[in-house]
Image: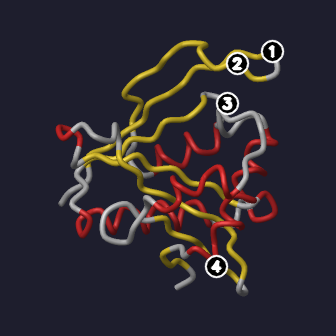
Amino acid sequence: MPIRIATVDDWKRIVDIYNDAIATRISTADTEIISVESKEQWLAQHDVDHYPIYVDVRDGVVTGWCSLSPYRLGRPAFRDTAEISYYVSEQCHRNGIGHSLVSHALSDCSRLGIETLVAILLESNLASIGLLRKFGFEEWGRLPKIAEIDGNRYDHLYMGRRVST
């Protein structure tokens, strides 16, 4: 099985893959390259028992990652809801890695006590929208034209699905 829980040793590769997504200008609302140091607190908040980061490893190289993060941290009414995010190395697209990561995360939700998953993404990220729909995610909300990247305006989508626990 090429998917495992991320460790501190994976953080640089996770950030590198995310920076590749920033460069596409369609996959994230971040517009500036980030560093491990700038994401250290976020990375450290993900633990195996509550909100893990999974990595897909092929031939010893992390090819993609998927995180389950608290949705609206600090608001107890959302304790059974997590935000799912995933990114695949540009060189590894169309190899089923995103599918494997999302499938793995979904299968782990029962252990984690997660009942609902929410994905928040740009309307320009058609590949992710298609993948999420394959897993039964539906559009639950849309904020029209609130993201501006390089002079282009995009809707911000909220997609979600209930997960059996």
Which amino acid, by three-letter code, is at mark 1? Gly
Dot 4 amino acid type: Val
Residue 43: x percent and y percent? 53, 59
Asked if marks 2 and 4 touch (Cβ < 8 Å), the reply is: no
Mark 1 near mark 4, Cβ–Cβ under 8 Å? no
Is mark 3 in CB contact (under 8 Å) with mark 2? no
Q: CA distance from mark 3 to mark 2?
A: 12 Å
Mark 2 to mark 4 CA distance (whole Å): 33 Å
Is the residue under label 4 in contact with that under label 3 (CB below 8 Å)?
no
What kind of element bears circle 3?
Answer: loop
Q: Earlier in the sequence, mark 3 or mark 4?
A: 4
Query: In the rendered view, does 38 fall on the left or right side of 67?
Result: right
Measure how far apart labels 1 and 4 are at the Cα level. 36 Å
Residue at 40% across / 46% down in the picture? Answer: 83
- The residue under label 3 is 124
Residue at image mark 1: 151
**Circles 1, 2 touching at the beta carbon (< 8 Å):** yes
Which numbered disc, 3 or 2, marks the residue closer to the eye?
2
What residue is disc 2 on? 148
Mark earlier in primary sequence (3, 2): 3
Q: CA distance from mark 3 to mark 1?
A: 14 Å
Label 2 element class: strand
Check the image and report above or below for 100 versus 93: below
Q: Residue at x 67, y 56 (%)?
A: 37
Earlier residue among tags 2 and 4: 4
Type of amino acid under label 2: Glu
Q: Measure the alpha-carbon separation of dots 1 and 2.
A: 6 Å
Q: Earlier in the sequence, mark 3 or mark 1?
A: 3
Instruction: Report the Cα–Cα distance between label 3 and label 4.
Output: 27 Å
